[in-house]
Amino acid sequence: MWQYSFLLTRLQHIHSRPDVHELTQHTNTIHSVRSLAQSNSDHELVELSYLLEISHALKFNISSINVNNLLSLASNLSSRNPLRQHHVQLSLMRMLLHVLYLTKVGQGHSALAKLKEHHQLMDSEVGGDMRIWDKEGKFDLLVCNGERKLYFDWFTQSEAFVFGYILSGAVYFPDSSAEKPLNFFMEGVRVADCTFHL
Amino acid sequence: MTLAILNGETYDTESWLSEVVTRRDRLRRLKRYSLLYASFAALLRSRWEIALKAITQLTDFNQTYFAKSTSDDSAFTYLYQLLLAIQNHYTGHLDVALQYYSDIPVQAGETFLLALLNKSLILRGGSQQDQAAAIKLVDEVERRLVASQHQYPQIRNAWCLVRGITSNEVLRSKFPHH
């Protein structure tokens, strides 16, 4: 457990404008998490490591990382993992990263298709049952053969919706005839205002 | 904080206040980006009233809840400067637009290149000196695109368009003249 904690804590600390060495170090740390998780058969953490590497590649435009391959690996692992229950946060993360990636590489139609899947997930899972989403945005992953848990902080339910609206607006943005982008962005503002009375 | 308690939060950990503040700040950042992109979406669709309303709301919100320091979120800062530049560009306040474009630093990447291209579009309508400066800006963008390890396909397309508009070269037609 302490090895996981140490490596994951290292991943939290990256310079806002890292040089090539720091970027490589960060990728290596993600790979260390993955190797450790694979040797312990902690499949949920392996899945998260794929998502972390995708996020790292997209954030810093690292063309040497094969994002498509990592998305496939994450998707396959989520369906093959015998211990993985339907983990809505991991599924949502993968979907958001996939839409971001497709938008970034200019595959607008594919991004739209993936976005529709995202909307279905938000409507059916995230918005449907408020009990499955911790109100502080915490979720856990099973490690050590399902006997222990690692806890993480991520989006609250409201943040997930606001981010989803921003992403939806961004995907529809190039269509200059459509009102959808404006509607999505303003809906995001409305949800943010309702949540914390900003 | 009172609202958080009323929403059912339990005040039972030392880090509770810190977590509530962090979540509130995160949501404010998301709202800021929503307003920013809504402003761009409205401008680019020539929905002036909506754009001006969104930009005003964004400016007020930004000034009220965020420090003036640009190190807070540089991506937002560069895009916000671009937004104000484009707003002034569209409404004919070209000197103000030029100033906002010039304030976007080279670290802004694509946003910087777009600012250079937009500046060149303003300057091409000016004096001979301005037109020469416009050509130099387009050359600068070309130089950076060639040297960059990133593809920037949309900026390349924009560069081609602006190069075509600002170029003084005459391309002779191959259509036979009789």
Image (cartoon, coloured by chain):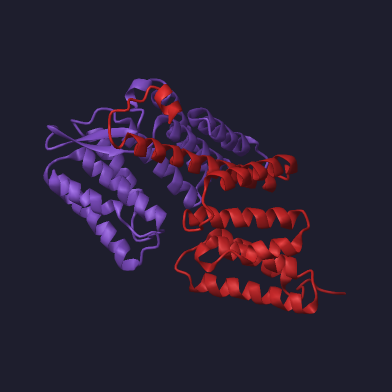
Q: Position of residue A114 (x, y in %)?
A: 45, 37
**Quarter of the view holding residue A21:** bottom left
Residue A67 appearing in the image: no
| Chain that appears purple | A
Task: Determine the residue positioned at 48% across, 53% down.
Answer: B73
Decide: is B169 above or below B10: below
Q: Quadrant of the C terminus of chain B?
A: bottom right
Task: Determine the residue positioned at 64% across, 41% down.
Answer: B57
Task: Determine the residue positioned at 28% across, 58% down.
Answer: A26
Residue at the far right in the pictured view: B178
Residue B29 appearing in the image: yes
Q: How many marks?
A: 0
Q: Nearer the viewer, residue A104 or A27?
A: A27
Q: Is A163 left, or right, of A36 in this rendering?
A: right
Q: Position of residue A126 (x, y in %)?
A: 40, 26
Q: Position of residue A84 (x, y in %)?
A: 22, 31
Q: Colour of chain B?
A: red
Q: Is A134 left, or right, of B157 in this rendering?
A: left
**Quarter of the view holding residue B93:** bottom right
Q: Is A189 left, or right, of B3 in this rendering?
A: right
Q: Position of residue A166 (x, y in %)?
A: 52, 40
Task: Determine the residue positioned at 36% across, 36% down.
Answer: B17
Q: Nearer the viewer, residue A77 or A43?
A: A43
Decide: is A166 above or below A58: above
Q: Quadrant of the N terminus of chain B?
A: top left
